Image (tube, rainbow, N blue to C red):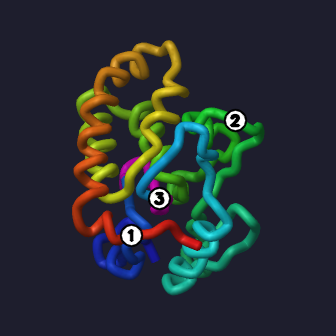
Amino acid sequence: MNIFEQSDLPKLGPYLHVADTDLRLLSVFDDLTYDRSDADMLSPAMRRHVVQRLERLGYKQTSGTVVKHGQSGICGLMPKFHALGASPFDITRYAPKRPEDFYILTPTQTACQFIDSYPLEQAVERVKALIEKQPINLLRLQDFLEHKPAHQDFLPAIGHLKYVQRVAVQSDPLRSMRALK
């Protein structure tokens, strides 16, 4: 079962979002508000929710960080940080995947993948579209932007994205969503 096909999207529910089919990213709703010191990681509740939803599509959890589809062998990887305070930009560094596999990330980690993978205008548009479905920790993202040209070019967009996020969390359907427990 390929969750990146349109027919499977309704089965994922409101807390999971196919964020990018090309990069093969599945984002898990985290919360509506953030503090810049919040740890950016998949919580146990988020992991449980992912496993429960994907089990309906034929996936089984094979380890703490991997769900695998029984028939196709496609794996969903939930990478973990290897150091406290690590950059959300590095989340996939130590979790290589095959082309058919996909990453399961927080919205902030997903936004970081967009910034590192797409030209500026595309990255901003993809982050904006993500924010409208799943808010991200913009202050944490800003804190971890590096001195690379792509990151420095993205920095001015943070102010506009803060506005987009404020409007999104005050509107339906986001305003009625709660963090997974």
Count of numbered badges drawn on the protein: 3
Q: Secondary structure at mark 2?
A: loop
Q: Which residue does the image show at 41% across and 57% down from the upper left?
A: 32
Q: If you read the primary sequence from the N terminus, does the residue marked by circle 3 or circle 1 appear first?
A: 3
Residue 64 percent across, percent down from the top left? 74, 66
> What whole-number distance in Å separates the C-alpha atoms at marks 1 and 2?
27 Å
Return the x and y of residue 45 as percentages of the image width and height.
62, 70
- What type is the residue that disc 3 sits on? Asp
In terms of secondary structure, where does tag 1 sit? loop
Residue 60 sits in quarter: bottom right
Queried whether the magenta region covers residue 87, the answer comes back as no
Quadrant occupied by the C terminus? bottom right
Residue at the (75%, 38%) spot, across then down: 84
Secondary structure of the residue carrying tag 3 is loop
Q: Residue at x 71, y 44 (%)?
A: 81
Magenta span of residues: 20-30
User: Outermost residue, bottom direction?
Assistant: 56
What label sits on residue 31 in the rendered view?
3
The part of the image, by quadrant, that contains residue 150 is: top left
Q: Is residue 102 left or right of residue 90?
A: left
Q: Amino acid at mark 2?
A: Gly
Callout 1 touching callout 2 (CB < 8 Å): no
Disc 2 to disc 3: CB gap under 8 Å: no
Instruction: Count residues near mark 3 (Cα–Cα under 10 Å), then give few for <14, some for 14-19, many for 20+.
Output: some
Mark 1 or 2, which is nearer the eye? 1
Q: Which residue is mark 2?
A: 85
Lateral position of residue 108 relative to residue 163, left or right: right
Going by the numbered disc 1, the residue's amino acid type is Met
The question of residue 25 being in magenta is answered with yes
Which disc number belongs to residue 177?
A: 1
Q: Nearer the viewer, residue 172 or 131?
A: 172
